[in-house]
Image: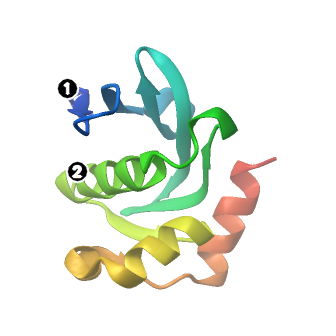
Amino acid sequence: MTEQPEPKATSAPDQPESTVRNEPSRNRYEITVDDERAGFAAYVESGGQRIFYHTEVGEQFSGRGLARTLVSAALADTRNDGKRIVAVCPYVAKYLKTHHDFDDVLDPVTPAALTAADNATK
């Protein structure tokens, strides 16, 4: 069992503090701003993989770079947990195309990963 990590706090000079936390019981990472949930990155685990299938940031929080902060923290935490990353989510896939620091733990999207993601949404 993985020990619950401390929340990761990040902030920009003119922005309120944001915190990213893994919520394993909900299979997602959540980002909060001033204690209000601003968004999440949903995943399902399959074998040694964490399959990210949906990322969402509330409209009232858009334009602040919170999705980038959320995904960056989620991927770093996934690596720290010794898991491989599968990017079914279009946003996560786009992020990974320009952030190659996760290439060593990135697996391709396979039919099995798509099935696992599809089953997680049911």
Does the CB distance between marks 1 and 2 fall below 8 Å?
A: no
Residue 36 seen anywhere in this rendered image of the structure:
yes
Instruction: Write down the residue under mark 2.
Output: 81
Q: Residue 56, how many percent across, how many down?
A: 62, 47
For disc 2, the neighbor class at 10 Å (few under 14, some 14 to 19, many from 20) is some
Residue 47 seen anywhere in this rendered image of the structure:
no
Query: Residue at 53% across / 49% down in the picture?
Result: 63
Query: Residue at 43% across / 14% down in the picture?
Result: 35
Query: Residue at 54% across / 40% down in the picture?
Result: 40
Snapshot quadrant of residue 97: bottom left
Type of amino acid under label 1 = Glu
Relative to 85, say whether 23 is above or below.
above
Relative to 60, say whether 120 is above or below.
below
* Side of 111 relative to 109 (left or right): right
Instruction: Tell me the quarter of the image containing the N terminus.
Output: top left
Q: Nearer the viewer, residue 34 or 89?
A: 34
Numbered label tally: 2
Type of amino acid under label 2 = Asp
Instruction: Write down the residue under mark 1.
Output: 6
Residue found farthest to the front: 14
SS under mark 2: loop
Query: Residue at 34% across / 78% down in the picture?
Result: 106
Of circles 1 and 2, the one toward us is: 1
Q: Residue 16, how many percent across, how many down?
A: 34, 25
Q: Residue 107, how many percent across, how many down?
A: 40, 81
Disc 1/disc 2 C-alpha distance (Å):
13 Å
